Each structure stands twice: as C-alpha cells, then as structure tokens.
Image: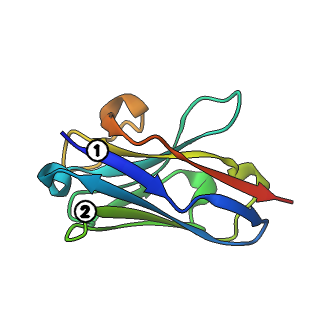
Amino acid sequence: QVQLVESGGGLVQAGGSLRLSCAASGRAFTYYAMGWFRQAPGKEREFVAAISWSGGSTKYVDSVKGRFTISRDNARSTVYLQMNSLKPEDTAVYYCAASNMGVIPTDFSPSNYRYWGRGTQVTVSS
C-alpha cells in the first residue's frame, strides 16, 4: 500500500516556475515507477512525466519536454516535478501516481498506475 500527498501547487504568471512534490508513505515506494498526470476542467486526465524506480529513466509528454523535469529521492520517498517556463495551457490539477512496476509503463494510460494522490492545483496566468 502506498499513500501519496502532493504539494507545491499555486498561482504563477506565465514564464514562471513551480516545483511540485509528492511525498509517499510505505516502504514499497522505492520499487515503483512514478508518474505525474494533470487534468484541466472538462478534459481527460493527461500523462505529463514518469520516472523509473531508480531514476535512471524518464519520459515526458511532448508539450512539456525541455520545460519540466521529473526526479525522485528514494531516501526521502519523494518525487518532484520542476516546472519552468510555465504557460497558461499548463493550468490543471496535477496528480502524482505510483505504478505497479519498476519500469515506466510503455503505455502512458492512467490505468497503468495503481496509487494516486488527491492532486494539487496549478494555475498559470497570462
């Protein structure tokens, strides 16, 4: 069992930065690939980024490549999402999720992630 709690969201102007954190409870955290998803009003939940159990492999959706960086600290049971050069279209609720495997699922569907946090709101003003 893994419990996830996101933090770090807020209101920022376009071009600004935020760092999201996801604190996990449960010793199994170190065995799971982790992901960040987001959901804007009226839209489906969208994959943003993922990281393997060791941190050695990462994946990003094309729209955030070069702007967002996912990382993890297994000693602290925490995964991060550094978001730079934010755009109004990045506005969404951001969710942290834990997969049920150590490698990043090749299918970025939310159904491949077993545990979810409650989300943190990110709002980017123009």
Query: Along the horizontal axis of the image, is 83 left or right of 35?
Result: right
Q: Quadrant of the N terminus?
A: top left
Judging depth in this view, the residue of 23 and 108 nearest the camera is 23
Give the class, few, some or many, for how many residues have Cα within 10 Å of label 2's Cα (few <14, many ≥20).
some
Describe the element under mark 1 as helix, strand or loop: strand
Residue 55, image x and y in percent?
27, 66
Describe the element under mark 2 as helix, strand or loop: loop
Q: Residue sitting at 70 percent across and 33 percent down? A: 41
Residue 13, image x and y in percent?
79, 67
Q: Amino acid at mark 2?
A: Ser
CB atoms of marks 2 and 1 within 8 Å: no
Query: Along the horizontal axis of the image, is 2 left or right of 83?
Result: left
Toward the right, the furthest residue is: 126
Spatial separation of the CA atoms under disc 2 and disc 1: 11 Å
Q: Residue sitting at 70 percent across and 49 percent down? A: 91
Q: Is residue 108 above or below residue 23?
A: above
Give the class, few, some or many, for how many residues have Cα within 10 Å of label 1's Cα (few <14, many ≥20).
some
Q: Quadrant of the C terminus?
A: bottom right
Q: Residue sitting at 75 percent across and 59 percent down? A: 87
Q: Which residue carries the number 1 mark?
A: 3
Q: Is residue 6 above or below residue 118?
A: below
Q: Amino acid at mark 1?
A: Gln
Query: Along the horizontal axis of the image, is 44 left or right of 106?
Result: right
Query: Along the horizontal axis of the image, is 45 left or right of 5?
Result: right
Q: Residue sitting at 75 percent across and 58 percent down? A: 124
Judging depth in this view, the residue of 42 and 61 nearest the camera is 42
Q: Which residue carries the number 2 mark?
A: 77
- Of mark 2 and mark 1, the one earlier in the sequence is 1
Judging depth in this view, the residue of 68 and 117 nearest the camera is 117
